[in-house]
Image (cartoon, coloured by chain):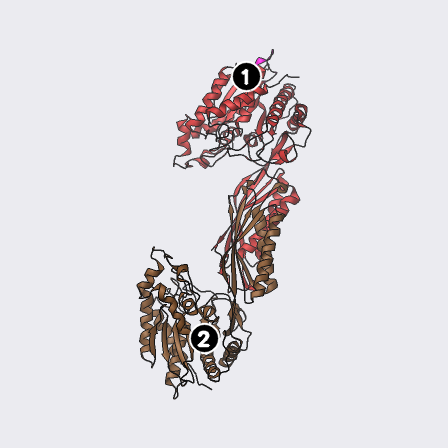
Chain colours: A brown, B red
Amino acid sequence: MTDLAIDVDAVLADLTALAKVSGGKHAGAKRLAWSDDWQAARAWLLQRLDELPVTIEQDPAGNLWAHLDGAGDDGAFVIVGSHIDAVPSGGWLDGVLGVTAALGVLRALAAADTPPPVSVRLVDWADEEGARFGRSLVGSSAAAGTLDPDDVRDLLDAGGIRLQDAMAACGIDLDAAIGATARLEGAKAYLELHIEQGPVLLDSDRLAGAVSGTVGDERYLIRFSGQSAHAGSTPMRLRRDTLAAAATATLEVREIAIRHEGVGTVGSLRSEPGVITAVAGFTEMMLDLRHLDAEQLASMLAECRAACEAAAARFDCEVELRRVFGATPTPFHPRLVALARAAVHAAGGGDGEPIPSGPLHDATEIGRQVPTVMIFAQSNPPISHTEVEDSPDAALRVAIDAYGRTVGSALDLVAAGELEATR
Amino acid sequence: MTDLAIDVDAVLADLTALAKVSGGKHAGAKRLAWSDDWQAARAWLLQRLDELPVTIEQDPAGNLWAHLDGAGDDGAFVIVGSHIDAVPSGGWLDGVLGVTAALGVLRALAAADTPPPVSVRLVDWADEEGARFGRSLVGSSAAAGTLDPDDVRDLLDAGGIRLQDAMAACGIDLDAAIGATARLEGAKAYLELHIEQGPVLLDSDRLAGAVSGTVGDERYLIRFSGQSAHAGSTPMRLRRDTLAAAATATLEVREIAIRHEGVGTVGSLRSEPGVITAVAGFTEMMLDLRHLDAEQLASMLAECRAACEAAAARFDCEVELRRVFGATPTPFHPRLVALARAAVHAAGGGDGEPIPSGPLHDATEIGRQVPTVMIFAQSNPPISHTEVEDSPDAALRVAIDAYGRTVGSALDLVAAGELEATR
């Protein structure tokens, strides 16, 4: 078995050092993609990589790669990594935990007496967050072949700068970015460590957990049309109250999500005229549905559609649904998920059921092409994308240790030819 | 019995003429209170009044009075009227129907061989709508003694002009306005004709109806506080979803209103962060409750409060209620309501149950001091405060005729000393 014990203290020291050069530990990260801040953070990473026997390259999409040779000569490799970019005033762990842990993997392998059985590549994906131009997973989707340059061309940031110009300032040509697909040729597995950014591990008192996949997501704007009317002069039986219809549908969405063991969220009901003295003649509902299983997600959506139509009919309103976003579920590789679960157990994190990830990750894109798994560290408070984001020291230690064990086991599996490809 | 047959054709001709000089019949009224347009409309009214044997005065609150002497010499009088002011781009009937019908009353009395048994005063209340400064019923509340100048001082219109300055431009001193209370000394009854501005008469196929009173009104802003959370990473069981709590309360409000035969309206649910990918950590609900009976209104409010608290508890949220407006019910005088009902019947409008008024009227203020009743003409479409406001010709004819009959009967009742005072 490949001995892969990450030096956890070194990873934690890296996290603290990186926070110091890019915003401070709880002062809000400054690593916005395609910015000078982001390039400064990468410069810090390159300094760390320069100490290791690796080959460093940036691919056409701006993803940063560090290749460490293994014993095999068939071009096969395993990918470790995450993203160094952050939302404005983000946390000190989102993304960079996975990058520094991957750095820990390379260090452990470089320090070993023998090379790993398979080559290992660290990756720092470009613009995972999409916080500047609104499009997430830019670098990983380019590598996965799902980025269409025309879909993102001319996206503007808050200052009116175009995405392609911000990329060009970093030496990246948007139209050439899709050439990054070549970087997955020979990739046998992708393993990513991340904080959970949610409350599931905290609530069940687990320090870390294997991730079963990233959920599929359906987002709709649902518009109820009725009749606005005077709140005083219009008897209840003569109303066509869109807010009553939307409230009914909102509660149905909740029941549907619970029934399917997914999540369903109505984040906003915006009414017109929206005043205290008038029945709402129009209400727009924002709906987000997620599930790890594509069929269950489709059922949830069908039931929510029916619930909206029934609620509209009940209150003599009309309704129309407009899809604004969709993502299919990405279940991770079952063999790797089992390895990660066992590794968390061995690292002292207990033997818990793998949990689905609600948020998207680079692993969502890569997981459709390459056998993939993630490990989550507990988040406490269970939130992210804010400077108060944090994880207990014990959770970080267990998660980093488990990540190293998982990578070690995955290398063995790949070397033995026992990990079947995803596609 | 006092013969009081209004010349309905003349009233309809007045309405058309007034519309012509102040905005056009379906082009949107231009009679905003305290404006030049409003004074121009009043100048038109003064010209009509000048043709009659009346004494004309403006009171300290800007209400316009025209006194026609009756046979009695005890200072008693009956008031007829409504308001000539309008919301911007308002309809051709709201307010002015009652003013022109009152003009019709004076004309009929002036044309009679003998004076009426009691004096009659036409009133055009100032600034009923409150459309410019946000405060309704300015002139009638001054007369009723419920206007506190300090409550309205420094209210600004959209152009930054203060209420007291707009009044001063019309020759009215805000601090002196409360002197208008003297105008109700000797008032024995107040009778007002108005369009319904709602769907009740239309829905029951009635052309006109007696009004049982104006409802009490309780308005609250209700704030639910929970926890905003990621729509993807937060399982349903761990949510503190304020929009789910508010939606539950919204549907309860509806059931409570139906149970009490009142009206209850949630016109808006505003959530924060209010985005498609987050559970709403805060939701503000706008609640309006109305009922003609004060005890029923209090019960509705108590039940709505309990429903909000139960809904908050169910979704692990907090809730606080803030009262933003309250008005007690004004039931009209039972003898006058009975007269108005009989008059509508006699005018060919059928014998229907008196209906409550959801909107407030000048009669709400005056009805607390003086025996009062209103008659409504059917609205079709059943809306108001818009240039498409309208009533069928047949409805206007029945309502105006019924109004004249009611005034005639009321004069007899007052002359006979059979109408007990309200207070």
Residue situated in front as seen by the camera: A178 or B267: A178
Q: Quadrant of residue B174?
A: top left
Q: Kindly give the residue lying farthest to the bottom in the view shown.
A: A113
Report the side of B386 relative to A34 (left or right): right
The quadrant in which residue B189 appears is: top right
Above or below: residue B75 compared with residue B178: above
Disc 1 marks a residue whose amino acid type is Leu
Chain at numbered mark 1: B
- Residue A268 on the magenta span: no
User: Can you give x and y, in whole percent of width and height, for residue B53 in the image?
Assistant: 52, 14
Percent x, y for residue B290?
Answer: 59, 40
**Residue at label 1?**
B68
Secondary element type, mark 1: strand
Main secondary-structure element of the magenta-colored stretch: loop
Q: Residues within 10 Å of mark 1 (few under 14, many from 20)?
A: many
Magenta residue span: B110-118
Q: Is residue A13 above or below residue A297?
A: below
Q: Is residue B205 left or right of residue B75?
A: right
Residue A406 seen: yes
Per the rendering, the mark at residue A190 is 2
Q: Work out how far the residue at label 2 is from the one at label 1, CA to CA, in angstroms.
A: 95 Å
Kindly identify the amino acid type of the residue bearing the numbered disc 2: Tyr
Question: Residue A127: horizontal and vertical position, in percent?
Answer: 39, 65
The percent position of residue B246, horizontal first and vertical second, equals 56, 52
